[in-house]
Image (cartoon, grey):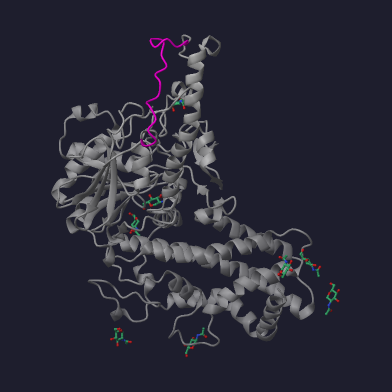
Amino acid sequence: MIFYRQCVSITIGVLLIVLFGFCWKLSRYYSIVSTALPHNESAIKVAGAPSIRWDNYHEFVRDIDFDNSTAIFNSIRAALRQSPSDIHPLGVSYFPAVIPKGTLMYHAGSRVPTTFEWLAMDHEFSYAFGLKSPSYGRKSLKRKHGRFGNGTHGNHPKGPPPDEQGPSSQKMLTYRAARDLNKFLYLDGASAAKTDSGEMDTQLMLSNVIKKKLNLPDDDENERMAERLYAARICKWGKPFGLDGIIRVEVGFEVVLCDFSSDNVELVSMLDMVHPNQYLDLPSPTVISKEEGWPLDKNGNLVEDQLTHDQKAILDREDGWEQVLSNFNAVESFNCIRAGAAHDHGEHRIHLDYRHLVSGINRTYINPDPNNRRLLNDGMTWEKQLEMVDDLERALKVGFDASQSMDWQLALDELVNKFAPLLKSVSNILTSDGDFNESVAINATALTLNFCLRFEAASNNSDQFGSGKDFAIYQYASPYQDLKTDADFLIWSSTVSVVREIVDVVYKVNDLLIPEVYSFMKDNTTSSDLKKHVETARAAVDGLIESLGWIELNYRCERQCNWDEVCYTPSWGPSPMGMTDPGSHDGGFGTHFDESRQRLVINNELQCISVSNLLANGNR
Ligand SMILES: *[C@@H]1O[C@H](CO)[C@@H](O)[C@H](O)[C@H]1NC(C)=O
Ligand SMILES: *[C@@H]1O[C@H](CO)[C@@H](O)[C@H](O)[C@H]1NC(C)=O
Ligand SMILES: *[C@@H]1O[C@H](CO)[C@@H](O)[C@H](O)[C@H]1NC(C)=O
Ligand SMILES: *[C@@H]1O[C@H](CO)[C@@H](O)[C@H](O)[C@H]1NC(C)=O
Ligand SMILES: *[C@@H]1O[C@H](CO)[C@@H](O)[C@H](O)[C@H]1NC(C)=O
Ligand SMILES: *[C@@H]1O[C@H](CO)[C@@H](O)[C@H](O)[C@H]1NC(C)=O
Ligand SMILES: *[C@@H]1O[C@H](CO)[C@@H](O)[C@H](O)[C@H]1NC(C)=O
Ligand SMILES: *[C@@H]1O[C@H](CO)[C@@H](O)[C@H](O)[C@H]1NC(C)=O
C-alpha cells in the first residue's frame, strides 16, 4: 500500500509538469495523427492479405456501429463455452467448426445409429441420459417425470423416455472421428433449448430456406420433433457440400452427425448399460397397482392406512433401497452437470475457423442484447435469409481449417482480461462514497495516466512512429494473423470499434481528472468542479461497462465452490436440474423473470450446487 502510494506520488511529482502537458495534448494529437494517414500508400496491397500497420489501419476498418460490434465481440467470446452460451442464449451466427481426427464422441441408445444422430462430447452426458434406473417403494409411484424434464417439449432424441425401457436395453456407444471432420457448423447460444423464443432460430432459418431451395414436401413436418426435422433437412441440404453436421450446447456440447459411415467415424466401444440395482443384485421393484392388490385411491395415490402388514414391510424395505440408490442416481446426474461446467471456459476439442463465420449481425437490425433478440426478426427478409444460406454454401465448398484462422477468441479474451479489471477498478474508485476530495482523482488517474502514458511520445517524433490514442487502439486490436476474408474484417472492425470506445473512455477520465491532480499538487487545492468531473467520468465508465455487455462484468459465482460442488449456470434445454422454459414465468433454479425482456434470465450471482441439490430437486 505504502509503496504503491509512494510510487504514484513520485511518478506524479517528478514527471508532473511534462506529463501534464502531454495529457492535455492527447486529443489534439489524435486528430493530427488521423488526418496524416495513410503514410505510405504502396504498403497497401489491394489483392491478397493487406499489410495492416499502425499508420494505415484506418484504411481497412469497415463500417460497423458500436452495437453491432459488441454483438460480434460477445458472440465470439461465448462461442463453445457452456456458461456464456446459456447466459447469452440467443445466438444469431453459424461458426465453421472442425472436430479433429481421433476425437471421441458418445451416444446412449437402444441401437447403433444408421441415419443422422446426436452424439455428446461428454460420456457423462450420454450416460446420465441413457440410464434411467427404476424407482423402488413409495417413490416408484411418484416418479412420473424423467430427470431431463417432464417431456412437454417432446422426447429428447438422444434417449428413450424414462421408465419405458427394460433393463439393459440401453447401449453406451463410443465413436472416434476417423478423419478431421472439417465441415461442421456450430450454432451459438443455447441452440439445443427446445424453445420457440429464438434460441433455435439458426436451425429454423436453415430448415425453412432448405425446404424452399430443395423443394421438400410439407409432410416432413409430421416429424415428431422440430429439431429432428431441422436436422433431417440440414443434413440433406449439406450432403453435396460434405457437411458433417451441426454442433450445439446442451449440458456440455453435442454434435448432430449427418453420416455415420466408417470414413467419418468408427465405433470403438459398445457397452450394455448396467443399472446399479442390477449390479447389486436387487430384485426388480415391486409393481404397486390396484391389480396387484395395493390400496390406491382414484388419483393413484397410496392409501397408507389400508396397507396390510406385509405390504408395509415390502414398502419399507424398498424405500430403504431407494434411499441408497438415489445417491447413485443423483451423482450420475451431478457428474453430467459437472461435465458441462468443465466447458464453461471452452470445449477445446472443437476448433473454430472464424474466416468463414456467417452471422446475422450487421445484416439487419439485431438487438445487441443476447437475451432480447432473434435472428428471425422482421428485418430478416427472405432475401437476407437466402443470402446467409448462400454464404454458408460458399464457406462449406471451401472447407474449414482452424489452423489457418486467427484465434479471435484468444485475442478478445486477452482484451477482456486486461480491460475488465481496469474499468471495474476505475468505476469503483469513482463510486466511492464518503468525503469527496482529491484522493478520488489521484486514485483514478493513477490507473488512467499509467495507461495513457504508454502511448505518449516524450517529444515530437515527426509522426514517423506510432503514438497517441489512435496508436493505442491499433496496438490493442492488432491482428496477429493476416486478415483474409470478409468475416475476418467484420470481426477485426468490430474489435477496433470496441477498443476505440474503451480507449476513448480511459482518456476521457484522465483528461477530466488530471487537471485536478495537477492543481492539488501545485496549490494544495482542487477545483470547485471536482465533483462534477468525477460524476461525468463515472457516468462515462459505467455507461461503457453497461454497453459492453461482458459476462465477466456482470456475472460471478457467489463464492469459490468446494470440491464436491459446481458453480452452476442454469441451462435452457433438458437438464438433470429440470427443464427451464425461458418463456415461462416460474423460474427454475438460478433464474428470474425479467419484465423488460419478458423472459427468464440467469441470475447475476451464480450459485454453487452439490449432489444434495439434485436429491432435493427430486431428480434422483
Ligand atoms: C512504402 O512501403 C513499401 C513496402 O513496405 C516500401 O518498399 C517503400 O520503400 C515505402 N515507400 C516509402 C516512400 O516509404
Ligand atoms: C411440465 O411442463 C409444463 C409446461 O412447461 C408445465 O406447465 C408443468 O407445470 C410441468 N410439470 C411439472 C411437474 O414440472
Ligand atoms: C447493425 O448493422 C445493420 C446493417 O448495417 C443496421 O441495419 C443496424 O441498424 C445496425 N445496428 C444494430 C444494433 O443492429
Ligand atoms: C479523502 O477521502 C478519503 C476517502 O473518503 C479519506 O480516506 C481521506 O482521509 C480524505 N482525505 C482528506 C485529506 O480529507
Ligand atoms: C485511494 O487509495 C488509497 C490507497 O490505496 C486509499 O487509502 C484511499 O482510500 C483511496 N481513496 C479513494 C477515494 O478511493
Ligand atoms: C513535428 O515535427 C515535424 C517536423 O519534424 C513537423 O512537421 C510537425 O508539424 C511537428 N508536429 C507537431 C505536433 O508539433
Ligand atoms: C456492415 O454493413 C454495412 C451495410 O451493409 C456495410 O457497408 C459494412 O461493410 C458492414 N461492415 C462490416 C464490418 O462488414
Ligand atoms: C493542504 O490543505 C489542507 C486543508 O485543505 C491543510 O490541512 C494542509 O496542511 C495543506 N497542506 C499543505 C502542504 O499546505
In reply to whether residue 294 is colored magenta, the answer given is yes
Measured from the top left, where is residue 408 in percent x and y? Answer: 37, 63
Measured from the top left, where is residue 297 in percent x and y? Answer: 48, 9
Q: Is residue 586 left or right of residue 387?
A: right
Indicate the quadrant where residue 164 lies.
Answer: top left
Q: Residue at x 35, y 71 (%)?
A: 59
Residue 228 seen from this side: yes
Q: Quadrant of ligand 1?
A: bottom left
- Which one is nearer the viewer's eye here, 22 or 215? 215
Image vertical order of residue 170 relative to residue 451, above or below:
above
Residue 597 seen from this side: no
Q: Quadrant of the N terminus?
A: bottom right
In reply to whether residue 175 is colored magenta, the answer given is no
Measured from the top left, where is residue 428 in percent x and y? Answer: 65, 60
- Which one is nearer the viewer's eye here, 422 or 159? 159
Measured from the top left, where is residue 530 in percent x and y? Answer: 73, 66
Q: Is residue 213 left or right of residue 338?
A: left
Q: Residue at x 30, y 28 (%)?
A: 166
Image vertical order of residue 276 relative to residue 20, above or below:
above
- Which one is nearer the viewer's eye here, 206 or 318? 318
- In the image, the segment drawn in magenta is 279-296
Q: Residue at x 54, y 62 (%)?
A: 420
Image vertical order of residue 477 relative to residue 92, above or below:
below
